[in-house]
Each structure stands twice: as C-alpha cells, then as structure tokens.
Image (cartoon, rainbow, N blue to C red):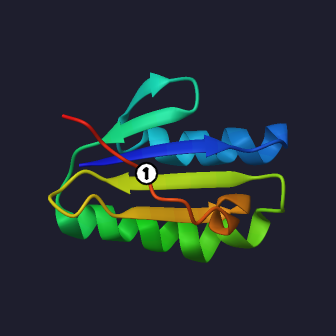
Amino acid sequence: MVIISYDISDDKKRRKFSKFISKFGHRLQYSVYEIENSERILNNIIMEIQNRFELLFDQSDSVYIIRLNPNCQVLRFGYAKNDESDMIFIE
C-alpha cells in the first residue's frame, strides 16, 4: 500500500495529477490518496509520475509517496525532494 500526498499550485496540473491518481486508489483527504495494489502496479504508478509528471513540477509543487511496508520508504518529487528530514510513523 502507498499513501500519495500532493501540493500542486497550478489548477490544471493539479486536476491532471488528481485524475491520474484517482484511477488507482481512493481519496482520504483533498490531496491525499490511499492506493492498495500489487507491487508491479505501484511501481508503474511511480514510474509514470517520474516520467510524465515530474517534468511538469516546479519549485512550488511537491508530491510525497509513502510506502507502508516494514521499511516505510518515502519518495519525494518536486519541491519535496529538498526536504530530507525523516518521518516517524507510530502504530
């Protein structure tokens, strides 16, 4: 499972990204989605974001992808790539 959270300032880019993500999961909050799928599909989603959307992001946009597994891997795109602080999850 992954949690995808985004903050995209441009309305057109935000709608396009939201429409893409909504095909795979359900919305938890306005800009937060939960996606439960196979590892292959999750990897395809990440590749699509890297290849299609990352080129469109500017320094005011950020996307967090949080893999909820034993390693809790956090991937950052856009401005979020500059944030290297660790996240702590409490169960």
Label 1 crowd (10 A; few <14 / some 14-19 / many >=20) = few
Q: Secondary structure at mark 1?
A: loop
Counting from the top left corner in percent of width and height, residue 74 is at 41, 61
Q: Residue at x 61, y 44 (%)?
A: 6
Above or below 85: residue 28: above
Name which quarter of the figure residue 24 lies in. Answer: top left
Counting from the top left corner in percent of width and height, residue 46 is at 44, 67
Q: Which residue is disc 1 drawn over?
A: 87
- Residue type, label 1: Met
Above or below 10: residue 57: below
> Which quadrant is the C terminus positioned in?
top left
Left or right of 67 in this view: 56: right
Name which quarter of the figure residue 59 lies in. Answer: bottom right
Count of numbered marks = 1
Q: Nearer the viewer, residue 17 or 76?
A: 76
Q: Residue at x 47, y 65 (%)?
A: 75
Q: Residue at x 43, y 27 (%)?
A: 27
Q: Residue furthest top?
A: 29
Counting from the top left corner in percent of width and height, residue 19 is at 57, 40
Name which quarter of the figure residue 84 lies in. Answer: bottom right
Q: Residue at x 55, y 63 (%)?
A: 76
Left or right of 26 in this view: 8: right
Counting from the top left corner in percent of width and height, residue 51 is at 59, 77
Q: Nearer the viewer, residue 72 or 26?
A: 72
